Image: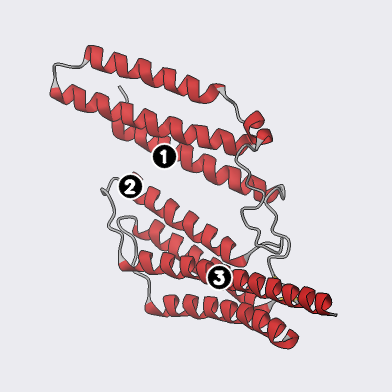
Amino acid sequence: MTEDVRKSPTWLPWVSLIILVIGAIVIFRFAPSDPGKLQVATGYLLLLIVFFTGVIILVLMATGAIDLTELLEDDTGGASMSRFQLLIFTFVIALSFFLLVAKGTGFPEVNAGVLTLLGISATTYGVSKSIASSAGAGQTADKDKGDKAKADK
Amino acid sequence: MTSVATLAYWQGLVLLGGFFGIIFWRLLTRQISLAGLLQADDEGFSPARAQMLMVTLLVAMQYLMRVIQLGTAFPELPQSWLAALGASHGVYLGGKARIVLFKHGAKS
């Protein structure tokens, strides 16, 4: 925990906050009278907020403050197939969503096919996780029984 | 002056590209480990995992190709694809559950 705090660049949130405050002051100083301009200015401000939030997360991931080494690992320490397929489908749907929005056809309707695809993927991850945890519980119970038997002897 | 839509496009590109880039870079440099991806817990190579990997990659690539070709909306998926994907994942989960049950069944 201490190491994570040390790794994270503490200046980044402050720089982002200062830029946002300056942006807000400029926007509300120069565009308060025209509702149209105010709407556009607020849009820019919201974009800045989302962008800096994303950049902070990206920087933390890149510097290792957000640890990704166990992203695909299961409880046994090996790579988990259920996590890997969930990552692939999340990438595919996110990329598809961005492509559709970027082509300017408006906000795309999320149809049943997408939901089914993500549903199968996420359900597989959930069931796999529950199987793994029940296995862990079983091993703990076996260990407890063994300990008790040794104590009885 | 740059429009809000153009700015949003470039921001999305930077954030998504950055996120994907970091994940792929970590995968390539093995900072995110894929060791044991095709191995069952104690049984070595796992055919169930291998078939799931192939079906997953196949469906994901086909879906992305369809999105690029269609370009206007999320494409409808054929029922046969969903059935194949569901069956593939079912086989994987069945294999995993069998290993867990077999282990504890043999012990008890």
Mark 2 belongs to which subunit?
Answer: A
Verify CB contact (< 8 Å) between mark 3 and mark 1. Answer: no
In the rendered image, which residue does mark 3 sit on?
A130
Task: Classify the position of the N terminus of chain B by image quarter.
Answer: top left
Q: Quadrant of residue A111?
A: bottom left
Q: CA distance from mark 3 to mark 1?
A: 35 Å
Mark 3 belongs to which subunit?
Answer: A
Q: Which numbered disc, 2 or 3, marks the residue that appears first in the sequence?
A: 2
Task: Classify the position of the C terminus of chain B by image quarter.
Answer: bottom right
Give the amino acid type for the residue marked by disc 3 in the picture.
Ser
x, y percentage for residue B47? 67, 78
Q: Is residue B28 above or below residue A123?
A: above
x, y percentage for residue A61? 59, 39
In the rendered image, which residue does mark 1 sit on?
B12
In the rendered image, which residue does mark 2 sit on?
A101
Any part of residue A131 in sight: yes
Verify CB contact (< 8 Å) between mark 1 and mark 2. Answer: yes
Dot 2 surroundings within 10 Å: few (below 14), some, or many (20 or more)?
some
Q: Residue at x 60, y 69 (%)?
A: A133
Q: Residue furthest left?
A: A34
